[in-house]
Every structure is written in structure tokens, then in C-alpha cells.
Image (cartoon, rainbow, N blue to C red):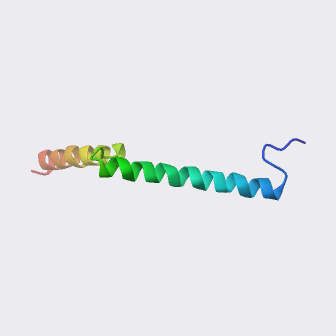
């Protein structure tokens, strides 16, 4: 039987720490971009806004 992950518990801890450090670095980079004015609206927010607008128009058409 083969395993895909490290077998040594100490190696798993370092892998977890590396993941946490990469995640923290991504967050720091995003905060830096936002402070420089490079903020962008997430796609899911735009999709939600579009769905609400279309839903509102449809409700207005069918309920009026």
C-alpha cells in the first residue's frame, strides 16, 4: 500500500505550517494591493448583484 503524504508526523507539521505561511502571504499581498487602490470586487459579488437585478425586474414584470 502506498501513501501520498509524509509518513513522519514532524513532516506533516512543517507541511501544515508551510500552507499557513503561504496563505498568510497571499492575504498580506491582497491587503497591500487594496491599500494601493488596486481593489477589485469579487466575481461572486458581481454575479449576486446581477441575479438580484434580473430577479427584481422579473418580479416587477410578472407581479405588476
Closer to the camera in the image, 23 or 4: 23
Which quadrant does the N terminus fall into?
top right
Residue at the far left in the pictured view: 64
Residue at (79, 43) in percent of width and height: 4
User: Residue 2, how many percent across, how many down?
Assistant: 87, 41
Residue at (51, 51) in percent of width and height: 25
Q: Tell me if 60 is positioned left or right of 9 in this view.
A: left
User: Residue 51, how many percent across, how many down?
Assistant: 27, 45
Closer to the camera in the image, 40 or 3: 40
Q: Tell me if 64 is positioned left or right of 18 in this view.
A: left
Q: Tell me if 7 is positioned left or right of 41 in this view.
A: right
Q: Tell me if 59 is positioned left or right of 40 in this view.
A: left
User: Disc count in the image?
Assistant: 0
User: Residue 17, how many percent across, how many down?
Assistant: 65, 56
Amino acid at each position: 500500500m502506498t501513501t501520498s503524504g509524509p509518513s513522519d508526523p514532524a513532516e506533516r507539521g512543517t507541511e501544515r505550517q508551510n500552507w499557513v505561511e503561504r496563505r498568510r502571504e497571499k492575504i498580506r499581498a491582497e491587503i497591500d494591493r487594496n491599500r494601493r487602490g488596486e481593489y477589485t470586487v469579487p466575481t461572486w459579488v458581481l454575479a449576486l448583484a446581477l441575479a438580484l437585478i434580473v430577479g427584481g425586474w422579473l418580479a416587477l414584470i410578472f407581479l405588476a
